[in-house]
Amino acid sequence: MKKHLEKQSTFNLGLKFLALLAKWKVTETLIPFFTTLLAEINLKLNKPNISENIEELANSWLKVMPPDGQHHFKKIKITDDIAYMEIHLNYPLRNSGNMTACNNFMNYDRSILKSIGGSLTVLESQANSGKNYCSVAIKRLNDTSGDLIQDQAK
């Protein structure tokens, strides 16, 4: 069962389900509930390490992603305070302009990172950037050095 839940195809199916919910305002509000639930399931299955080290946080986040889909998640740059990452998935919200739904989708990653001592900020989203990847930044949960510019639904 665990092997099946951790497949990239299962992950993609979850994204498609969430994209379907994002089509209507009445169901869009359910996305944070489902992303939190899916993150909790992932955390129970994989038990990632809690860390204060940025590179370890990035590695722990990568380890909970589907083993057969690791090539979709790339480390771009690691500094003392921030891990810059890219997500190269066929994102169902690509070019939709729906940053509210994107923010709700990313609750999954934020929930995972929060539980292991980190936070995630979306720097660029496929939903509105025209690119075929999302750029994100991972910081320590207790980092007070300042905020990153985040895509907003405007």
Image (cartoon, rainbow, N blue to C red):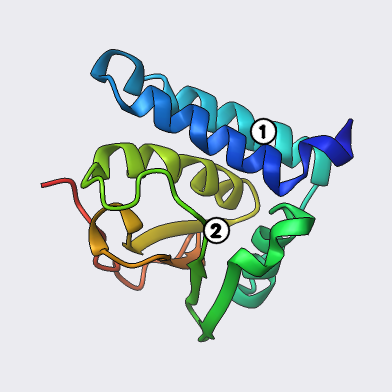
Placement of 114 over or under 136, stated as above or below: above
Query: Do the residues bearing badges 1 and 2 touch, measured as CB atoms within 8 Å?
Result: no
Q: Would residue 50 be visible to someone looking at this image?
A: no
Q: Mark 2 points at which residue?
A: 118
Q: Which mark is residue 40?
A: 1
User: Which residue lies at the image location 33% right of the left edge and 58% below the top edge?
Assistant: 125
Q: Nearer the viewer, mark 1 or mark 2?
A: 1
- How many marks are shown on the rendered structure? 2
Q: Residues within 10 Å of mark 2 (few under 14, many from 20)?
A: many
* Residue 69, x across and y down, in percent: 70, 58
Q: What is the x, y in percent for residue 145?
A: 35, 73
Q: Where is residue 55 in the image (x, y as percent from the top left)?
A: 64, 76
Identified at 27% across, 52% down, the residue is 95
Whole-number angstrom distance, CA of label 1 to CA of label 2: 15 Å
- Residue 65's tag is none
**Badge 1 local density, few (<14 within 10 Å), some, or many (20+)?**
some
Q: Residue at x 87, y 41 (%)?
A: 3
Task: Classify residue 9 by image quadrant.
Answer: top right
Residue that sits furthest to the left in the current view: 154
The kind of residue on which mark 2 rests is Gly
